[in-house]
Amino acid sequence: MSLSSPGVERFVYYRIHESDAEAALLVFQEAVPAGSVRLMRRLDAGAGALQTWMEIHAADTGAQTEPALAAALAPFIQGPRHLEQFVPA
């Protein structure tokens, strides 16, 4: 399966330092059209901790939005950016 296969949804997770979260969120919002990517944050982040964020890219736009966000958020990401791809069953 290639990255451009029809029906492929992209789930990307990575860590952001809590002190960078507000700035990273602004960059996220400016990098992609509103509503085109869902952003989730894991609940267990604490003061001074790294937060785990997950982007959910729709099949029809993910081939464009995923690389755009990877580039825009690169200065904030701590460690690797993990990309997983799924298709409907």
Image (cartoon, rainbow, N blue to C red):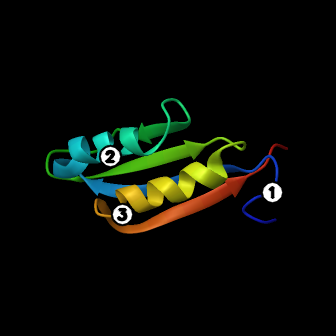
The C terminus, quarter of image: top right
Image point (35%, 38%), residue name: 43
Q: Quadrant of the N terminus?
A: bottom right
Mark 3 — residue?
74
Gap between marks 2 and 1, in whole Å? 28 Å
| Residue 35 seen anywhere in this rendered image of the structure | yes
Q: What is the CA distance from the residue labelled 1 to the residue labelled 3?
A: 25 Å
Badge 3 marks a residue whose secondary structure is loop
Residue kind at label 1, given as amino acid type: Ser
The local crowd at label 2, few if under 14, some if 14 to 19, many if 20 or more residues have their Cα within 10 Å, is some
Q: Is residue 6 left or right of residue 21?
A: right
Q: Is residue 75 left or right of residue 4?
A: left
Nearer to the camera, 55 or 49:
55
Give the labeled residue for mark 2: 27
Q: Residue at x 32, y 46 (%)?
A: 27
Q: Can residue 13 be seen by looking at this rendering?
A: no
Where residue 75 appears, x then y in whole percent?
29, 63
Q: Tag 1 or tag 2, which sits nearer the N-term?
A: 1
Front residue of 89 and 30: 30
Residue 5: numbered disc: 1
Residue type indicated by callout 3: Ala
Image spot of residue 61 (x, y percent): 65, 44
Q: Is residue 78 above or below residue 51?
A: below
Residue type at mark 2 is Val
Label 1's element?
A: loop
Question: How many residues crowd mark 3 within 10 Å: few (<14), some (14–19), many (20+)?
Answer: few
Quadrant of residue 16 within the rendered picture: bottom left
- Tag count in the figure? 3
Please name the residue shown 46% across and 39% down the image. 39
**Label 1 crowd bin: few (<14), some (14–19), many (20+), radius 10 Å:** few
Where in the figure is residue 4, as x and y percent of width and height?
Answer: 75, 58
Alpha carbon distance from label 2 to label 3:
10 Å
